Structures are given as structure tokens and as C-alpha cells.
Amino acid sequence: METAIVSNRMLGLIALYDLQTPFFNNVLDEISDEDAHNRLNTKANHVAWLAGSLVQQRFDLAEMFGATGHKQAAYDLFKENKGIQEGVTYPSLESYKKDWARITPICREALAKATDEKLNSMFEMPGMQFPFFDMITFSMYREANCIGQIALYRRLLGYGAMKYM
């Protein structure tokens, strides 16, 4: 694989991307699919939704940066930033892990090749717009936030703490 020359602006974000990549599998380790759907009698998003939304986020980022034609197996459950749906059984955590492994190198390469022109161009969504660089920054923050939520769920569900190695 050809090594891309990474924009200096992207170095820190790529470092976060690489740091968080193994955390996804680590935080899901040993959680049963039954427990992954347990909302602990709250309205909070459960582990299965959090994990699937993280996978979808990487697929969406890859597409925004030119790696088109890739979809996660659970695309219909998460497309267009769809929120958690009541009464739906989400896919297994193993399914998400497979899609994470599939999209991660594709997305990383697309992000690493991002030009300053693309990073400065505007990302638009209803009612707001901001530079693509800010979108990536928010996405890296959200990854860390969701992994942290799953890490808390681990403990609340009686699992051991997430391993970092």
C-alpha cells in the first residue's frame, strides 16, 4: 500500500483515530449480545446502538473523503444518522467488529489523503455548515465519547474494565 503524505493539520486527528481503533474491539470484548441491548431501565442508547453508530460514522467519513461504495451490514438501521429504534434487535457485536475491521483502513487512507482544500471546504447539513476539518475533529471526539459510554456500560453490566492493550 502506498503511504500517503498526511497534511500537518491531520496528524493529531490521525493519531486519535489510530489510538481509538483498537479501543472499539477492547470495549466490546466479552459483552453478550443480550447485554448489548440492555438499556438498564433508562432511555439511554444501548451498547448495540452505540457500536453500530460508531461503525456507521467511519463508513460516512470514508465516503465524505472519497472512498465511496462501502456500506456496513446494518446500514439501514443507521443511515442518515438514524437514532435508536424501539423494539429492534440490532446486529451482533461480532458483525460490527467485522465491519469496523473492514472500513478502518479504507477510512484512514481517505483521511490521510485529505487535502487542505478539502479540509477547508464546507460540510453542510440542515441549518448549519462548517469546515470538513471541524467535522473530522467532532467525529474523533464522538468516537472517544461513545467508547467511554460503552466502557461505563461494561461496568454497570458487571463486566471488567476495558483493557487498553
Image (cartoon, rainbow, N blue to C red):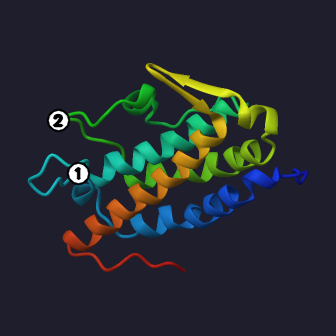
Of 84 and 123, the residue lying toward us: 123
Disc 2 crowd rating (10 Å Cα; few below 14, some 14-19, many 20+) is few
Q: Give the quadrant of residue 156.
A: bottom left
Residue under pointer 2:
87
Mark 1 is on which residue type?
His
Q: Is residue 109 visible?
A: yes
Q: Identify the residue at horizontal 12%, vertical 51% (top origin).
A: 42
From the viewer's perspective, tell me whether residue 87 is left or right of residue 74: left
Estimate the x, y position of residue 138 in percent, counting from the top left.
52, 46
Which circle marks residue 9 in the picture?
none
Which residue is the extreme one toward the top?
126
Mark 2 is on which residue type?
Gly
Of 135 and 164, the residue lying toward us: 135
Q: Identify the residue at horizontal 34%, vertical 68% (top origin).
A: 151
Q: Cα distance, mark 1 to mark 2?
A: 10 Å
Q: Give the quadrant of residue 61.
A: top right
Estimate the x, y position of residue 109 in percent, counting from the top left.
76, 47
Pointer 1 or 2: first along the chain: 1
Q: Give the quadrant of residue 123.
A: top right
Of 139 and 99, the residue lying toward us: 139
Estimate the x, y position of residue 5 in percent, counting from the top left.
89, 51
Q: Identify the residue at horizontal 60%, vertical 44% (top origin).
A: 136
Q: Is residue 99 visible?
A: no
Q: Identify the residue at horizontal 27%, vertical 37% (top origin).
A: 84
Of 123 and 148, the residue lying toward us: 123
Disc 2 element: loop
Q: How many marks?
A: 2
Residue under pointer 1:
37
